[in-house]
Image (tube, rainbow, N blue to C red):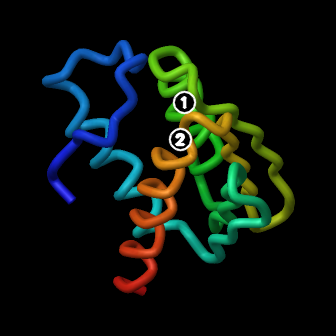
Amino acid sequence: MSDLAWVPQSCTLPTEERPLRVAEWDALFSERLTSPSRPQPLHLRLDLASGPGVQERVRDLVQRESGCCSVFTFTTHADEGLIRLDISVDQAHEAVLDVLASRTADAGEQW
């Protein structure tokens, strides 16, 4: 999915940096995602395997994403061996969450 037309117009990340950010998310998903779920249409839950530096990596990525893309609401919770990342959007941005969920499914195929 190299086409980034799904990125919301409200995203303030410079266009040339967007593929790099998407690649960061994709790498996190392919390396650490253990269980994606969609408890509600506007809510994506990702369980990530913990490890050295992973919690900091997730927090950094969430912080940077929150700074440029206000459509997402992120919540993280770390437990022994697991980092839970909850991502929510409003109704107007459900399609953006759909694409993100699809990317996690694509990463799951690599397991």
Q: Nearer the viewer, residue 43 or 60?
A: 43
Question: Residue placed at 61% from the left, 76% from the top?
Answer: 34
Question: Residue placed at 46% from the left, 54% from the top?
Answer: 100
Asked whether, in this view, residue 30 is left or right of residue 67, the answer is: left
Question: Residue placed at 48% from the left, 22% from the top?
Answer: 69
Q: Amino acid at mark 2?
A: Arg
Q: Are marks 1 and 2 in contact (CB under 8 Å)?
A: yes
Which residue is tagged 2?
Answer: 57
Which residue is tagged 1?
Answer: 60
Which quadrant holds the C terminus? Answer: bottom left
Q: Nearer the viewer, residue 41 or 12?
A: 41
Expressed as whole percent of the image width and height from the top left, the position of residue 109 reads: 38, 85
Expressed as whole percent of the image width and height from the top left, the position of residue 90 reads: 67, 34
Picture layout, residue 105 above or below residue 24: below
Q: Nearer the viewer, residue 5 or 33?
A: 5
Q: Secondary structure at mark 1?
A: helix
Asked whether, in this view, residue 95 is left or right of residue 75, the answer is: left
